[in-house]
Amino acid sequence: EIVLTQSPGTLSLSPGERATLSCRASQSVSSSYLAWYQQKPGQAPRLLIYGASSRATGIPDRFSGSGSGTDFTLTISRLEPEDFTMYYCQQYGSSPLTFGGGTKVEIK
Amino acid sequence: QVQLQESGPGLVKPSETLSLTCTVSGYSISSGYYWGWIRQPPGKGLEWIGNIYHSGSTYYNPSLKSRVTISVDTSKNQFSLRLSSVTAADTAVYYCARGVGWPPAWYFDLWGRGTLVTVSS
């Protein structure tokens, strides 16, 4: 099973700043099958990125993904008030599908 | 507009079987995609439970495989989850979702709102 470790656990930033979230895999994720989700309190996760760098439908271009192998990054270029919430990565390169423990982006 | 909606009891007794149904609207399950269940214990992360195709082919997380059954009813455009011998550790919000990709590689592009299931006597 591939274990995903997200860091930092909490990221304290101000609106307008750049956020860089990390997702590290315990072994290489084949074909860059890595997705990112945003989850607001009391809501279901929302797909942001798939295939490590492809934005899902309707996702603003301030969200971008990069990486390959074992190291992946989600970047939010300029934080909007609605971006302060939880983010999870998920690998789908091998079974079982696994999720990271999450990064909380909070207002500084 | 495709929507998914979970339904089922919110309280299950220990050792009993948890049963949930996901009703899909705006899209025919028989048209494609895989359909899955994911859960999230209160305040914790996400855990994939399993996926099903409209043909009935199933794919389960090995950690839960001995207790999980996922089935599909294409006539009702629904798929269901059964989890047996539940304990307090199975208390979670259960989500149904649409899986994109091919076995065993899926990400989830559409999710239901989720339903909280509490295991308690």
Image (spheres, coloured by chain):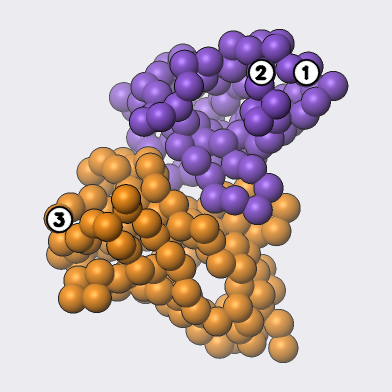
- Looking at the rendered structure, the kind of residue marked 3 is Ser
Q: Colour of chain A?
A: purple
The residue that appears at 75% across and 24% down in the rendered structure is: A11
Q: Are marks 1 and 2 on the same chain?
A: yes
In front of the other: A7 or A85: A85
Q: Which chain is orange?
A: B
Report x, y in % for residue B11: 63, 82
Subunit that carries the residue with mark 3: B
Disc 2 target residue: A79
Neighbor class of circle 1 (other Cα within 10 Å; few <14, some 14-19, many 20+) is: some
In front of the other: B24 or B84: B24
Q: Is residue B103 visible?
A: yes
- Residue A32 in the image: above or below residue B91: above
Disc 1 target residue: A13
Badge nearest the viewer, 3 or 2? 2
Q: Are marks 3 and 1 on the same chain?
A: no
Report x, y in % for residue B116: 61, 68
User: Cβ–Cβ below 8 Å for labels 1 and 2?
Assistant: yes
- Looking at the rendered structure, the kind of residue marked 1 is Leu
Q: CA distance from mark 3 to mark 1?
A: 44 Å
Disc 3 target residue: B31
Q: Is residue B67 visible?
A: no
